[in-house]
Image (tube, rainbow, N blue to C red):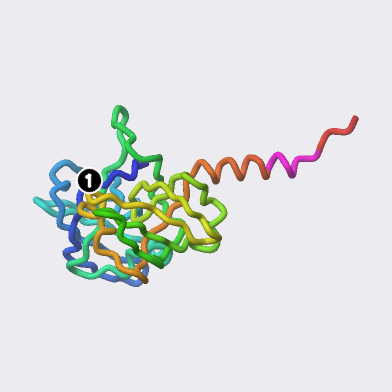
Amino acid sequence: MYTGIIEDLAVVESIRRERKGATLSIKSGLSSGMAIGDSVSISGACMTVVSKSRGKLTVEVSAESLRRSTLGALKPGDRINLERCLTLGKLVGGHLVAGHVDGIAKVVAIEPEGDSRLFTFEAPASEARYLIEKGSVSLDGISLTCFGIRGRRFSVSLIPHTLKVTTLGCKRVGAAVNFESDMMAKYVEKILAQRGSAVAPEA
């Protein structure tokens, strides 16, 4: 579990593709505070650290993660967002993020708003129903508030700090980002669906 508050803008050192997945090596100062077996969010996708050394950590990426996220398109030198998993007593500055990518969203517009930027994204078709005005969404692992919802399209406002310390600062129109819906909306939907399909007892 994560909070969507990015801790490090790390760099991909190498990616070795295999028949059923890939091995990803990452340069990051967070490696000193991590252990083998720890979970880490890589641009919104939850991965497990399988090895580490000074200034570097390595994760193995499954075929499913490559299919459902932008990790399969990474190349050496690319920037990625990193966040260590949530611990008890840690401030939840964003919202509860599972690190389970639902699909890929696209940047469709970027407009300046003073020093900030107004980004418009297009959500995956299967996830658009979870968009709620002023609700939470995770994009590349970043906890953001969405608004201006029009069908599959929605907007988020990014302050200069977020643009500086996350991958969104270098995204352009047409870029892909990992998308995770607010898990609370999914739980509510499932509970209500189960209640609606329950057969009322006979009198």
Q: Position of residue 148 (x, y in %)?
A: 48, 54
Q: Position of residue 189 (x, y in %)?
A: 61, 45
User: For the point 44% across and 45% down, which residue is it?
Assistant: 136
Nearer to me, 21 or 127: 127
The image quarter in which residue 194 lies: top right
Task: Confirm whether the magenta stretch covers residue 123.
Answer: no
Nearer to me, 112 or 11: 112
Q: Position of residue 77 (x, y in %)?
A: 17, 67
Q: Magenta residues?
A: 194-199
As drawn, 169 above or below 138: below
As drawn, 87 above or below 147: above
The outermost residue toward the right is 203
Q: Secondary structure at mark 1?
A: loop
Residue at which label 1 appears: 7
User: For the point 88% across and 33% down, which residue is it?
Assistant: 202
Q: Amino acid at mark 1?
A: Glu
Nearer to me, 115 or 66: 115
User: For the point 47% across and 46% down, which residue is it?
Assistant: 182
